């Protein structure tokens, strides 16, 4: 028997029964069967938002594979799923597309014990946090507002599984390409003249409306007429015209690969059409770059998509936060259910793409960047802790989820809870939880970076340039595009200062 003075101290565990040693493993133990909500375990979980039982809880997200995902270990979703222990190995042929961290019924996050996060909370979170790995283009789509979502859910609950709206915000982890919002009428008019194959898919009435529109109201109506005409073009006609278009574009590229006589945005548009046509043969949706803005954003940049605005993500990896919904109205570039009539009717037909948001420092620290949309359900913070530094998370008055997106390190708080941070690990933070302090050893060769999603605490101070009109980017012809102002931290408003508890 080991003398009492030499006995090992008991292994400390959190409320889920997870030890520090478990946290240090590369993946969590297999999910155990769910326990009854009436057990002592559930009761202890329900109490952890109090001042005496607050603690951060590791989560197991839900992983989704769709045809547009990135295959194998090239996918960040796959690597994060492996790290969080929800898969045992990565299949090199599987397109890992999305990681869901939240309470939506189609992909609820779980605690290590197998209890769902919704069972713990007794309700849904107002937001859904995701990671997307896009290997090829997603469908041309839009998300309904609340009134339309309720109507669609009643009429077709199989296709529209919930009654909530779905505004969303994307923050790039890699260079990210997307088609967002309608082009300016001037651009579409020029493309109709330049590409007769595209013009052949549009009715004469719609083309006349585009050429003759000269005020916001007539331009919006012209966009509606053009989009309706294109989406309802006879399939045989659109397929034949797409073949002719591709033949001409490839011939022009072959004869003069370094032609710079056309403006850069027109050349980019043509290359995008050829690329989409390779991914979706014989789908006229490949001509979408002729009427949708084609954007490229850098890591750390973001954009917000309001309800009823057309978009299609093209390539790259992002974190995405949205209202807790999975409602999508699709119309092209997909083998899934297409609902063209509803998509045509629901869009706002405003011109220009979303403003590009670089975020703003908050809580008195330039290492904490918040991205705040003009909706109450969510906002996101990106926190960066460099080697040899420590960084204390703000104490939040609402529940939050955080995800390690880059680097490694560890955390500690006043309750003595220590966690090992590795990319892909995600945690639930109850409201009022003692703030964690991130730390990175000075021997590390890069920063620890985490993303924190929670209910919007800065709804009166969104980071989009114009919260009333988020679709304000004026397109390829505008040389005076708005830019975000760098905030003056010295003159920061009181609501953005670090809480006194820190």
Image (cartoon, helix red, strand yellow):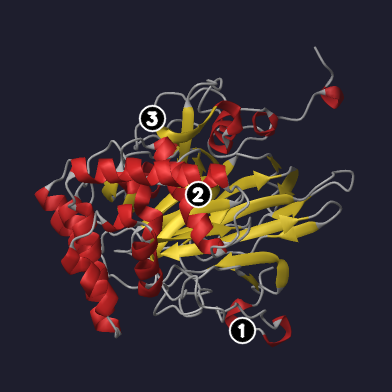
Q: Position of residue 279 (x, y in %)?
A: 42, 36
Q: Which numbered disc, 1 or 2, marks the residue closer to the eye? A: 2
Whether residue 400 is visible here, answered yes or no, is no
Label drawn at residue 93: none
Number of disc labels: 3
Q: Position of residue 229 (x, y in %)?
A: 19, 59
Residue picked out by circle 3: 35
Q: Position of residue 296 (x, y in %)?
A: 55, 57
Tell me which corner region of the image, top left, top right, bottom left or bottom right, holds residue 297. bottom right
**Camera-side residue: 76 or 426?**
76
Q: Is residue 474 above or below residue 249?
A: below
Q: Residue at x 49, y 61 (%)?
A: 266
- Secondary structure of the residue carrying tag 3 is loop
Q: Is residue 109 above or below residue 398?
A: above
Q: Residue at x 24, y 80 (%)?
A: 218
Label drawn at residue 271: 2
Tell me the crowding category of disc 3: few under 14, some 14 to 19, or many 20 or more residues within 10 angstroms, Cα based. few
Q: Residue at x 31, y 37 (%)?
A: 282
Tell me the crowding category of disc 1: few under 14, some 14 to 19, or many 20 or more residues within 10 angstroms, Cα based. few
Q: Is residue 387 above or below residue 461?
A: above
**Camera-side residue: 401 or 372?**
372
Tag 3 or tag 1, which sits nearer the N-term?
A: 3
Residue 124 relative to residue 202: left or right: right
Label drawn at residue 494: 1
Tag 2 or tag 3, which sits nearer the N-term?
A: 3
Q: Residue at x 50, y 70 (%)?
A: 476
**Camera-side residue: 147 or 266?**
266
Answer yes or no: do the residues labelled 1 and 3 have beta carbons within 8 Å?
no
Tell me the crowding category of disc 2: few under 14, some 14 to 19, or many 20 or more residues within 10 angstroms, Cα based. some
């Amino acid at each position: 028997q080991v003398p009492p003075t030499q006995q090992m101290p008991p292994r400390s565990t959190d409320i889920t029964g997870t030890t520090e040693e478990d946290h240090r493993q590369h993946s969590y133990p297999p999910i155990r069967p769910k326990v009854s909500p009436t057990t002592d375990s559930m009761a202890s979980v329900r109490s952890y938002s109090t001042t005496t039982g607050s603690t951060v809880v590791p989560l197991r997200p839900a992983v989704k594979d769709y045809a547009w995902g990135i295959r194998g270990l090239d996918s960040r979703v796959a690597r994060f799923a492996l790290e969080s222990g929800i898969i045992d190995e990565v299949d090199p042929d599987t397109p890992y597309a999305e990681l869901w961290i939240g309470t939506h019924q189609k992909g609820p996050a779980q605690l290590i014990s197998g209890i769902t996060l919704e069972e713990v909370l007794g309700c849904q979170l107002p937001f859904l946090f995701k990671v997307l790995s896009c290997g090829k283009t997603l469908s041309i789509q839009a998300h309904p507002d609340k009134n339309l979502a309720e109507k669609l859910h009643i009429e077709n609950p199989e296709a529209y599984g919930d009654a909530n709206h779905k505004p969303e915000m994307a923050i790039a982890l890699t260079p990210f390409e997307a088609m967002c919002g309608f082009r300016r009428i001037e651009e579409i008019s020029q493309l109709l003249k330049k590409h007769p194959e595209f013009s052949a898919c549009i009715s004469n009435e719609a083309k006349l409306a585009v050429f003759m529109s000269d005020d916001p109201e007539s331009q919006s109506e012209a966009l509606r007429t053009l989009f309706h005409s294109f989406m309802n073009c006879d399939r045989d006609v659109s397929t034949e015209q797409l073949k002719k278009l591709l033949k001409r574009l490839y011939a022009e590229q072959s004869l003069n690969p370094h032609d710079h006589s056309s403006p850069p945005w027109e050349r980019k548009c043509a290359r995008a059409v050829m690329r989409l046509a390779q991914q979706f043969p014989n789908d006229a949706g490949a001509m979408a770059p002729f009427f949708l803005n084609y954007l490229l954003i850098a890591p750390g940049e973001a954009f917000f998509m309001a309800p009823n605005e057309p978009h299609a993500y093209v390539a790259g990896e992002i974190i995405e936060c949205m209202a807790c919904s999975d409602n999508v109205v699709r119309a092209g570039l997909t083998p899934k259910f297409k609902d063209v009539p509803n998509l045509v009717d629901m869009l706002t037909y405003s011109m220009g793409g979303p403003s590009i948001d670089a975020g703003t420092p908050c809580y008195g620290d330039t290492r904490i960047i918040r991205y705040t949309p003009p909706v109450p359900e969510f906002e996101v913070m990106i926190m960066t802790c460099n080697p040899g530094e420590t960084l204390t998370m703000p104490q939040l008055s609402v529940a939050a989820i955080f995800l390690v997106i880059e680097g490694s390190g560890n955390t500690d708080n006043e309750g003595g809870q220590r966690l090992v941070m590795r990319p892909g690990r995600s945690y639930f933070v109850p409201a009022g939880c003692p703030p964690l302090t991130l730390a990175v050893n000075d021997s590390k060769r890069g920063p620890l970076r985490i993303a924190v999603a929670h209910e919007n605490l800065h709804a009166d101070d969104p980071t989009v340039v114009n919260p009333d009109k988020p679709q304000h980017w004026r397109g390829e012809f505008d040389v005076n595009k708005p830019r975000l102002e760098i905030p003056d931290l010295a003159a920061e408003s009181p609501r953005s200062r670090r809480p006194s508890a820190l």
